[in-house]
Image (cartoon, grey):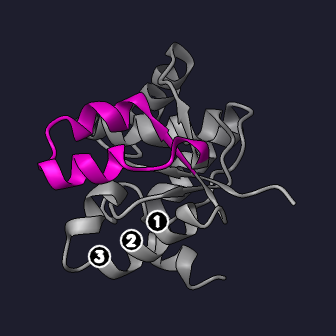
Amino acid sequence: MRKPRLYFDTSVFGGVYDIEFQHETNLLFDMVKNGEIICVYSDLCELELENAPEQIKSHFLSLDKNKTEFVEITEEINELAEEYVKEKVVGQTSIDDCRHIACATINKVDYLISWNFKHIVNVFRIRGYNAINIKKGHIQLDIRSPKEIITND
């Protein structure tokens, strides 16, 4: 059986050391370590993590590269992200959030995982992202919090 591919936005890596999200985030990373799911991440995550506290960076760097998948932000992804902003799903200040959504969409992951409830894991925003995805001939992206993933085993 094919392992589910889950795109982790940067908030998930930070969740390891966030009191509110720590428990669920650690269970999610246990699923990666146990080979139950594949952690897909992008060069945008790497860039955003450059400014993260050392403990978050070292956790990220300690991930087994055989259980992760690296993807790059491409021109196609940037164009789709700009479309989300142009269609006012979110404002221009959320362009990097849009890049994560577009990256997960273009790479056809099974889920995008995030702790960002304002701009990403939000039913109204998800509807907006997917309306544009459908209009542009892309997949409907399933967006969830880590809590929703770990309770569905």
> At x 36% / y 59%, what residue is drawn?
12
Residue 22, numbered label: 3
> At x 49% / y 43%, what residue is drawn?
101
Quarter of image, res 14: bottom left
Q: Which residues are magenta?
A: 39-66
Q: Is the residue under label 3 in contact with that under label 2 (CB below 8 Å)?
A: yes
**Alpha-carbon span between mark 2 and mark 3:** 5 Å
**SS at circle 3:** helix
Q: Is the residue under label 2 in contact with that under label 1 (CB below 8 Å)?
A: yes
The residue where tag 2 is placed is 25
Q: Position of residue 38 (x, y in %)?
A: 62, 53
> At x 14% / y 48%, what residue is drawn?
54
User: 83 or 112, which is in the foreground?
Assistant: 112
User: 144 or 54, which is in the foreground?
Assistant: 54
Q: Position of residue 61 (x, y in %)?
A: 34, 43
**SS at circle 1:** helix
The residue where tag 1 is placed is 29
Going by the numbered disc 1, the residue's amino acid type is Phe
Q: Quadrant of the C terminus?
A: bottom right
Of the numbered discs 1 and 3, the one sitting upstream in the chain is 3
Residue at the farthest right position:
1
Left or right relative to 21: residue 77? right
